[in-house]
Amino acid sequence: MFGVLSSFVRKKTVGLTALLLSSTSAFASADVVLKSSDFVGISFWLISMALVASTAFFFLERDRVAGKWKTSLTVSGLVTLIAAVHYFYMRDVWVLTGSTPTVYRYIDWLITVPLLMIEFYLILAAIAKVPNGVFWRLMIGTLVMLVGGYLGEAGYMAAFPAFVIGMLGWAYILWEIFGGEASKINATQAPQNVQSAFSLMRWIVTIGWAIYPIGYFIGYLTGADPIESMKGLNIVYNLADVLNKIAFGVIIWSVAVTESQKA
């Protein structure tokens, strides 16, 4: 059964990769050409291709891990796949118009960030019985953080109150993974490899995710022109996703392979 499933995932991975790459060919035939001085556009191209490669890697590596770790790798692959699709769109819009509509970022984040939070639950569930409350607390914190940020950036709410709401959601997530029930289960029931992975993942959520509220603050709360801030912020956001999405998944892959080999 697992052999059939693995074959199916492998075929779908090849198909999805080809589909994503086909948009590159379509874009290349357009009249607009990426300029060597367009560092924002270059960063979009780099991260979009890195996300496609990561998607193929995570799906294909499912064959190497035990059954209880396969879901974690599948979720990692879904995160990079969803992000890659959005990056292809944002890349093309940037090169064509010199802008990146806020809605594209948040459509991506509203799907991928909850999936990243689920990974904390999944790696603990692979080695211990984890209460459902852990899952729901992480989801609630994530949604509060994202909805607050979107309301402020899209202009549906004053920038500062929306910023505070988003920060409260982020703080709630940090509390759960550093001092809450998820942290306690990791400290008392997880083997050393899982504890190390959990620690690295939560530091990515702390340091890597800090880039986004800093960008929000610079763009909306310092009096700077958001349009003028866009170029630098896009480069920072694009490079940050190498850490926040790809490296995050690699950490999970590493602990999944290590624990599977021990079994």
Image (cartoon, rainbow, N blue to C red):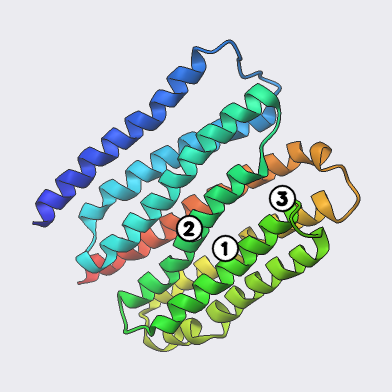
C-alpha distance separating marks 3 and 2: 28 Å
Q: Residue at x 10, y 52 (%)?
A: 3
Work out how far the residue at label 1 is from the one at label 2, CA to CA, in angstroms. 7 Å
Nearer-the-camera pick, 92 or 191: 92
Whole-percent x and y of residue 39? 68, 29
The mark nearer the N terminus, 1 or 2, is 1
Query: Which residue appears at 50% of the width and 71% of the height?
Result: 139
Using the numbered discs, state the Cα–Cα distance from disc 1 to disc 3 in whole angstroms. Answer: 26 Å
Q: Quadrant of residue 254?
A: bottom left
Above/below status of 8 relative to 204:
above
Is residue 239 at least partly visible in the picture? no
| Three-letter code, disc 2 | Phe
Task: Give the SS element for disc 1.
Answer: helix
Q: Position of residue 241 (x, y in %)?
A: 56, 49
Say whether disc 1 or disc 3 marks the residue closer to the N-terminus.
Answer: 3
Which residue is denoted by mark 3 in the rendering? 154
Disc 1 vs disc 2: Cβ atoms closer than 8 Å? yes
Left or right, 199 with reference to 127: right
Amino acid under label 1?
A: Ile
Q: Residue at x 47, y 34 (%)?
A: 49
**Residue density around tag 3, few if under 14, some if 14–19, many if 20 or more, within 10 Å:** some
Disc 1 target residue = 204
Q: Please tell me whether residue 187 is drawn above or below residue 214 in the rendered image.
A: below
Residue position for label 2? 248
